[in-house]
Image (cartoon, rainbow, N blue to C red):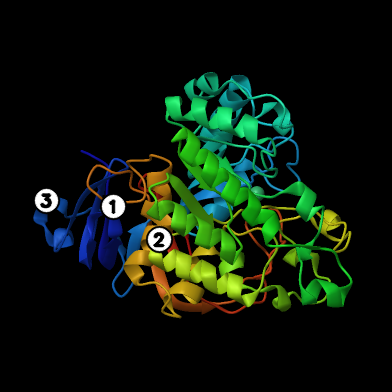
Amino acid sequence: MPERLIVAGGLVVDPARGLEAVRDVLIEDGRIAAVAAGLSRKSALKGAPVIEAKGKWVIPGLVDMHVHLREPGREGDETIETGAKAAARGGVTTVLAMANTEPVCDSPSQLAFLRAKARSDAAITVLFAGAVTVGQKGERLTEFAKLRAAGAAALSDDGRPVMNAGLLRRALEYAKDLGLLVIDHCEDLDLSNGACLHDGPEALRKGLKGAPWAAETVQVVRDIALAELTGARLHIAHVSAAASVAAIRAAKKRGIRISAEAAPHHFSLNDDDVPGYDSNWKMNPPLRRAEDRQALLAGLSDGAIDAIATDHAPHGCAAKALGMDLAPFGAIGLETSLAAALTELFHKKVLTRRKLVERLCAGPAALLGLENKGTLAPGADADLVVVDPDAAWTPAVPFFSKSRNTPFAGRRLKGRALTTLSAGRIVHAL
Ligand SMILES: [Zn+2]
């Protein structure tokens, strides 16, 4: 007998199949077996455990293509195990972990170690990016073919940009031959120059150095040119500026193979929301102007932006206590991304239900070439979330993440994951 579970009576939202209807979902041996009405009443399925989802949404598990799990090197801030628990709590069942650990994930042996660790420690699917350059130093390319053979799900130097355009050009050419996605953190370091806020009146008022929007956009535009030159696929991480969104939209219209993601903090918050010198609001790129945020919303709506990704970046309290100018960049996001997206995008009518789920699930799954993720099609992995779209709650400590650096703490959100399944197993239940 197969191991069975039925998720009954929920509003199934599966944009990959154009499905939005009340259905039962039958799970067998960790995979979706059927999505249909009345399954829970079938005599052949009598006795199978049932998760009641009446009045709730049933959506594919979220695919977050941008997280930092800090293992190895900074296990005090996060581990693969705690990051995966935080993800499950937020309805996220697949994550792509970035390579800027200590040491950097730039070799097949490092990848093998991390993948084995994820298999033993993580309750969800943890994928790993390999670094583009050795040690993320921006000098020498890593061995892409060997990284791919060792299971790299993408290539990225995230945390740092690939500043050398010649090197990125060669990276794109090799990655294209191997079918690997290159993800670039777009920041011209000479323009951003270590600044901690957006370069505008708010930074000036606080007496802090700001990074202009152009620090991002000049590199987005450079990357678009290199994607056009090489014909390779290129993905822009954490887009924050209106001019970047416009450049990406125009490039897509010209058929260039570019894609982009936006983070919940960037589409929810502006630079003038930053309370005083609270370093939990310090991230890179920084929160920008209201008009940048509006451009992100428009980009998420019209498809200039393909995916929602958190850039989950845990930092311990000691590091964040160094103050706005010295604290490290980043905020955790796995436990709040679904809620922030529901609050800012769905409830404020920026995105339809179907489009929201597309940007959280099918969109990123497609970018990473994950055919069995981001959908509830029969045969797909039984990664699934029962969502209460109307549950009001306020994120606060304790978090499942080892860190607590988030601008969403104390902020009223509407909607959350009630139950999360990964490969048919319950990995979170509220
Ligand atoms: Zn980054």
Q: Quadrant of the N terminus?
A: top left
Q: Nearer the viewer, residue 314 or 139?
A: 139
For marks 2 and 3, give the one nearer the viewer.
Answer: 2
Residue 214: % across, % down: 68, 59
Q: Residues within 10 Å of mark 2 (few under 14, many from 20)?
A: some
Q: Is residue 96 visible?
A: no
Residue at the left extreme of this rendering: 43
For marks 2 and 1, give the one nearer the viewer.
Answer: 2
Q: Amino acid at mark 2?
A: Gly
Residue position for label 3: 44
Residue position for label 1: 376
Q: Amino acid at mark 3?
A: Ala
Q: Report the number of numbered marks.
A: 3
Distance of label 2 from label 3 (alpha carbons) = 43 Å
Query: Cβ–Cβ below 8 Å for labels 2 and 3?
Result: no
Q: Nearer the viewer, residue 182 or 330?
A: 182
